[in-house]
Image (cartoon, coloured by chain):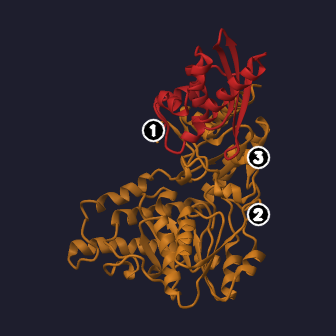
Chain colours: A orange, B red
């Protein structure tokens, strides 16, 4: 990211060199179609099979349970639309949360226009779904519970094993959007107890445009696109072999490095948080209580507009976010922060600082110094003080 | 996403602050985004001799407040009343779609400050 300070790793991450290197042969040298019988095709197929095994192992799944997709949005769509279609004779009710990514929320809203009923579970001030509310929302005609593992704006981690246990007691399938969680916390499909899990490569230093969907053996799923037999006909289309190789490489490295990186990032994040709280008045950390991801700090500054602060930092060469990049420019308060029950002034002044494997101690010093100048300057503009 | 002029007026907003004994003043709040503009004017010989403001808001709100003050200073009161958010946005080299609403605050505050000035006249 040139000489800029990139603190927006929840939006996307730079491709790591090892993943790029692993991908390069598959653009031109080994460029067969993995569905072809000839040697060129089979070399691509070998890479595809190895990547599938590697991703399956990382998740505690079997290779057959891994479908490669075009990314997180596609994975979420396939999981939700595919399960509800497969179970349409059984029921028309799904449960999700108010703080999901738009890839889940907009899909659920579309299903509502097709006659399905959707329950959007509220969250508490720490961004956590209430299990009693979930229990009360489960109905005989509920076919799916889809709740994100970790939130992209505030980092709150849901009690997924308990959620899955509760849903399964009622015979309901469970999908989780693990896009933000992957590479930031341990993710094992059996420990979580989920039936479907979405991940995307570009959040853990893999390439953009490539993801995977875990589908537990025996889970009813209909495709949402039609074509060839690839990915067990559930995601037809010639596989993106360079992307898949990059995904598998980045995921393996992220998981190897997870214990060290999560400790390192949490320490950097905690120092950032503590220094902001002691050096800048009228500040609120959103979802400060654990469990949350180690790399996300969502913080609100009273009497400052988040977008203005983002731009002020940008002009100093520092990239942060006001929420999800998907909502940027929409000029609407974050639906996640609204669901936390934040007052308007805190909604307005929120920014998300998200760290990654390239983040250094000096980056934290620099963003702190910038905040200590820009927040008072913007406040003076607002209050004349 | 933002023009060079918007970035300039955001980074270095002109005419910020307040006037000790303004001839007219007004505050406009945007209930949706919690934005607000507090604007004060000094009138001399029927013209806007000085405009100062405080602004809480996004990049577009800050830049359009700055540009409103620049465009309106020196105008007669009737000329200033004719200043539209579209003219402010145009002078800024345009604003992104969805941000035009943020450029309404300062011209509206100016209009109300002039009304306040006129209401104070005997």
| Label 1 Cα neighbours within 10 Å, binned few <14 / some 14-19 / many ≥20 | few
Residue beneath the point at 77% across and 35% down: A279
Residue A2 badge:
1
User: Going by the picture, which residue comes out furthest to the top?
Assistant: B45
Q: Which mark is residue A89?
A: none
Is residue B14 visible in the rendered image? The answer is no
Of marks 2 and 3, which one's residue comes earlier in the chain?
Answer: 2
Q: Nearer the viewer, residue B24 or A69?
A: B24
The residue to which callout 2 is attached is A124
1 and 2 marks on the same chain: yes
For residue A304, which quarter of the picture?
top right
Q: Chain of mark 2?
A: A
Direction bottom: furthest residue: A89
Residue identified by numbered label 3: A284
Q: Is residue A136 above or below residue A125?
A: below
Q: Is residue B69 left or right of residue B121?
A: left
Same subunit, tags 2 and 3: yes
């Amino acid at each position: 990211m040139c000489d800029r300070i990139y603190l927006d790793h929840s939006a996307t991450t730079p491709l790591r060199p090892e993943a790029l290197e692993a991908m390069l042969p598959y653009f031109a040298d080994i460029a067969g179609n993995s569905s072809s019988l000839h040697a060129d095709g089979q070399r691509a197929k070998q890479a595809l099979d190895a990547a599938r095994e590697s991703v399956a192992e990382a998740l505690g799944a079997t290779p057959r349970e891994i479908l490669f997709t075009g990314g997180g949005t596609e994975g979420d769509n396939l999981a939700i639309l595919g399960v509800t279609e497969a179970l349409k004779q059984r029921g028309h009710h799904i449960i999700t949360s108010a703080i999901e990514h738009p890839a889940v929320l907009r899909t659920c809203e579309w299903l509502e226009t097709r006659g399905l009923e959707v329950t959007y579970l509220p969250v508490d001030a720490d961004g956590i779904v209430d299990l009693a509310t979930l229990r009360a929302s489960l109905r005989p005609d509920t076919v799916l519970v889809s709740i994100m593992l970790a939130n992209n704006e505030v980092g709150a981690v849901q009690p997924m094993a308990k959620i899955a246990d509760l849903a399964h007691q009622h015979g309901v399938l469970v999908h989780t959007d693990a896009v933000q969680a992957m590479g930031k916390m341990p993710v094992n499909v059996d420990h979580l107890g989920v039936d479907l899990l979405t991940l995307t490569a570009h959040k853990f230093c893999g390439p953009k445009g490539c993801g995977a969907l875990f589908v537990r053996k025996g889970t009813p799923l209909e495709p949402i696109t039609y074509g060839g037999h690839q990915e067990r006909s559930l995601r037809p289309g010639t596989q993106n072999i360079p992307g898949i190789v990059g995904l598998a490489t980045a995921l393996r490295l992220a998981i190897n490095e997870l214990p060290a990186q999560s400790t390192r990032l949490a320490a950097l994040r905690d120092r950032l948080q503590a220094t902001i709280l002691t050096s800048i008045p009228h500040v609120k950390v959103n979802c400060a209580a654990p469990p949350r991801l180690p790399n996300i700090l969502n913080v609100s500054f009273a009497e400052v507009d988040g977008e203005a602060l983002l731009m002020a930092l940008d002009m100093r060469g520092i990239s942060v976010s006001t929420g999800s990049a998907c909502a940027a420019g929409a000029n609407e308060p974050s639906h996640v922060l609204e669901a936390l029950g934040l007052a308007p002034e805190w909604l307005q002044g929120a920014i998300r600082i998200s760290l990654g494997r390239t983040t250094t101690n000096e980056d934290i010093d620099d963003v702190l110094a910038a905040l200590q100048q820009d927040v008072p300057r913007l406040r003076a503009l607002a209050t004349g003080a | 996403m933002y023009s060079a002029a918007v970035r300039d007026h955001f980074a270095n907003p002109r005419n910020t602050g307040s006037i000790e004994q303004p001839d007219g003043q007004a505050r406009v709040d945007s209930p949706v985004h919690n934005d607000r503009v507090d604007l004060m004017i000094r009138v001399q010989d029927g013209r806007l001799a000085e405009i100062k403001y405080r602004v809480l808001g996004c990049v577009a709100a800050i830049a359009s407040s700055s540009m409103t003050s620049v465009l309106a200073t020196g105008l007669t009161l009737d000329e200033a009343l004719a200043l539209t958010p579209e003219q402010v946005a145009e002078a800024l080299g345009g604003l992104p779609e969805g941000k035009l609403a943020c450029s309404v605050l300062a011209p509206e505050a100016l209009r109300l400050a002039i009304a306040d000035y006129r209401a104070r006249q005997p």
